[in-house]
Amino acid sequence: MEETRFMLAEKEMPTHWYNILPDLPEPLPPMRHPVTQEPCPVDMPLPPPLFPDAINRQEFGADRWVEIPDEVQAIYRTWRPTPLQRAHRLEAALDTPARIYYKYEGTSQAGSHKPNTAVAQAYYCKKEGVSRLATETGAGQWGSALSMGCAFFGLECKVYMVKASYYQKPYRRNLMETWGATIVPSPSPDTEVGRSILKDDPECSGSLGIAISEAIEDAFAHDDTKYSIGSVANHVLLHQTIIGEETRRQMELADAYPDVIVGNVGGGSNFAGQFLPWVKDKMNGKKPDMQIICVEPEACPTMTKGPYAWDYGDSAGLAPILKMHTLGHGFIPAPVHAGGLRYHGMAPIICHLYRLGFVEARAVHQTATFEAGVRFARTEGIISAPESCHGIKVGIDEALQCREAGEAKTILIAHSGHGHFDLAAYDEYLSGRLQDYEYPKEAVIAALADLPGVE
């Protein structure tokens, strides 16, 4: 069996992030202030500022290419470039003529793509004299990555971890604590937001929206603290484009070009980091028939069931109002194991491209994703994070369609990380205890009752 692994030398790692904003065929709708509901001016996005000045500039920047600081590049090189692998064993098992590649981000110290932005955000905060960061985390990948980034730059880190995942994934907490962070289950008694929710519902399992509210409140309450986010925001997607830029170079080495790009989306940073450097080829007509497929859980069907509307980025209405597909900022997800895919909204850039027809979306059940994850593990050897299994599931579906149609398409899977700290979820699946959950239509309607009403 042929094994093909496409690697770049350290010196070939991209030195710039790609900013898609100047290449969009229509401008992205501007974020709005959570109190006034007015569009936020580019030079004064939010009072008080959530992010350091450098991050604010990147959030709204007009430069197509943004240089990666030398200090960030040096840390990137401890795990980058990451490998692009040809999945020959999976292809053989599927008996498909499709050529399947996957870009594997699980080789970072934190085991996922998240350090690509965590290291950058910690760097910019340190450079501007910030000494402490507050953040949220769903499944723990983002909290782990930011804890590591803060350790590299000598910053304190407070992590509000969605309660369901806090107890489902104790080893993620251990990672964060080892890197020096302080972690609490969200909703927590540490903030007004958390105390209010616990008073009404002491057993609340939490949501990313609630955890974001707590982290923002924390940042506003401390002069030495900035808020840090691991997905959704433009600057986060910008930092993640190193994934796609590397992959373009590696696909050239493979003498291949993707017909289908597939990946999981929760807030959207991993998959956007892969597809944004490619979607420009679809927008400019170089590859108009390319399929870009965003995969989300049926338990949190943001793009496939949520309307495209203005909504708060958090549960308490402290974060900016964004134009995005949303299930409503009051959405409380079922405690499915793909904790990183349980956000009520989606990155505005992804939603904008979806509306314009450049990307598509599918929702899948968690038992089917774990079936695909096990199949991938038994052919390619990688035990994937539950989030990554969503993209693998649809990648396999596309390969099987190629078998039925006799088409030799090239499929590229964005693989966000390993599942070594998610083995309890695999145990649920392998023992037959794992249950599917489909978010009901009436719950979507109820959750949308409190949209801010921005026209």
Image (spheres, grey):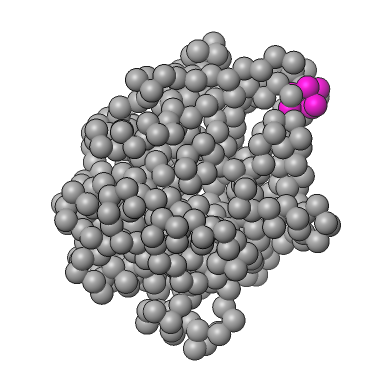
Quarter of the figure with the C terminus: bottom left
Magenta-tinted stretch: 90-95
Quarter of the figure with the N terminus: top right
Is 92 contained in the magenta span? yes
Q: Quadrant of residue 403?
A: top right
User: Is 12 situated above or below 291?
Assistant: above
Residue at position x 77%, y 44% from top?
A: 371
Q: Position of residue 277 (x, y in %)?
A: 42, 29
Is 172 contained in the magenta span? no
Say whether residue 277 is visible. no
Q: Is residue 154 left or right of residue 88?
A: left
Magenta region's main secondary structure?
helix
- Along the viewing direction, whichever of 340 and 362 lies nearer the viewer: 340
Q: Position of residue 435 (x, y in %)?
A: 77, 61
Q: Is residue 338 left or right of residue 78?
A: right
Q: Is residue 350 left or right of residue 216?
A: right
Q: Quadrant of residue 36?
A: bottom left
Label count reads 0
- Along the viewing direction, whichever of 327 and 248 lies nearer the viewer: 248
Residue at position x 57%, y 37% from top?
A: 415
Residue at position x 55%, y 13% from top?
A: 254
Q: Position of residue 52 (x, y in %)?
A: 21, 54
- Name the residue furthest bottom: 199
User: Is 320 situated above or below 268?
Assistant: below
Q: Position of residue 375 (x, y in %)?
A: 76, 37
Say whether residue 80 is visible. yes
